[in-house]
Amino acid sequence: MSPIHPAWVRASHGLNAVAVLVMVASGWRIYNASPLFGFAFPEAITLGGWLAGALQWHFAAMWLLAANGLAYLALNLATGRLFRRFLPLSPRGVLRDMAAALRGRLAHDDPRRYNQVQRLAYLFVMLDVALLVVSGLVLWKSVQFDMLRELMGGYEAARRVHFAAMAALVGFVAVHLVMVALVPRTLRTMIRGS
């Protein structure tokens, strides 16, 4: 019997977890250097010590996240897993599974099969990470990526998009962790493959 999650899925999941943790913590330190809003993140949950250190951590994790994300997407497409695991998706199916989840009646009998809410969430996070990368390129090399900058409405708009996409990713991770706590078998399958 083939594993629920092949080794390459488990490896990319672990690498993404590390990259996202480093990017969020260092990104919060970068944000604190020039806040968009009237708050700052507590220094205890940031990474880098100072702006230059945070930028170094952020860029190092950025390369890991981008390379790992491209490899994950390529392998999902090459193996057909993207279409098997994440599609089809319908508004009716999402609403049905969301209602079942809110009533505590969403079955998790077969960990090989994602429900419609999971499919939507995983497709969303793939698009969200792509948006983080694109907006991050504008923030990193605004002059070199001037067309992207203009498509995003300028540098300050790209900062807001990057912040919103980061907040969405943190929200996804929080919900993901709650779901893992509610269905702990999913963690075991992600670690062992079956």
Image: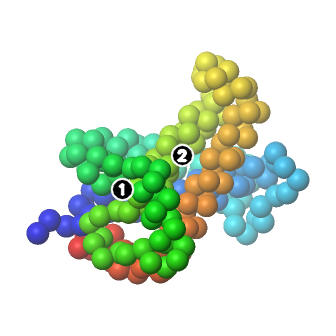
Q: Nearer the viewer, mark 1 or mark 2?
A: 2
Image point (56%, 39%), residue name = 131
Q: Amino acid at mark 1?
A: Ser
Quarter of the image where one finds residue 183: bottom left
Q: Position of residue 132 (x, y in %)?
A: 57, 42
Question: In the visual, does 51 lie left or right of 10?
Answer: right
- Given the current orientation, which residue lies at the most extreme right position? 38
Quadrant that contains the N terminus: bottom left
Q: Position of residue 36 (x, y in %)?
A: 81, 45
Q: Is label 1 in contact with label 2 (beta carbons under 8 Å)?
A: no
Image point (49%, 72%), residue name = 101
- Binning the other alpha carbons within 10 Å of mark 2 as few (below 14), some (14 to 19) or many (20 upward) gives some
The answer to whether residue 169 is seen in the rendering is yes
Q: Position of residue 40 (x, y in %)?
A: 82, 58
Report the front residue among 30 and 74: 74
Look at the picture and state if 39 lies above or below 110.
above
Q: Secondary structure at mark 1?
A: helix
| Alpha carbons under labels 1 and 2: distance apart | 17 Å
Q: Which residue is mark 2?
A: 128
Look at the picture and state if 80 lies above or below 158.
below
- Binning the other alpha carbons within 10 Å of mark 1 as few (below 14), some (14 to 19) or many (20 upward) gives some
Circle nearer the N terminus (1, 2)? 1
Report the front residue among 172 and 43: 172
Q: Amino acid at mark 2?
A: Asp
Q: Which residue is mark 1?
A: 12
Quarter of the image where one finds residue 48: bottom right
Report the front residue among 70 and 174: 174
Image point (34%, 43%), residue name = 73
Report the front residue among 184 and 98: 98
The answer to whether residue 71 is seen in the rendering is no
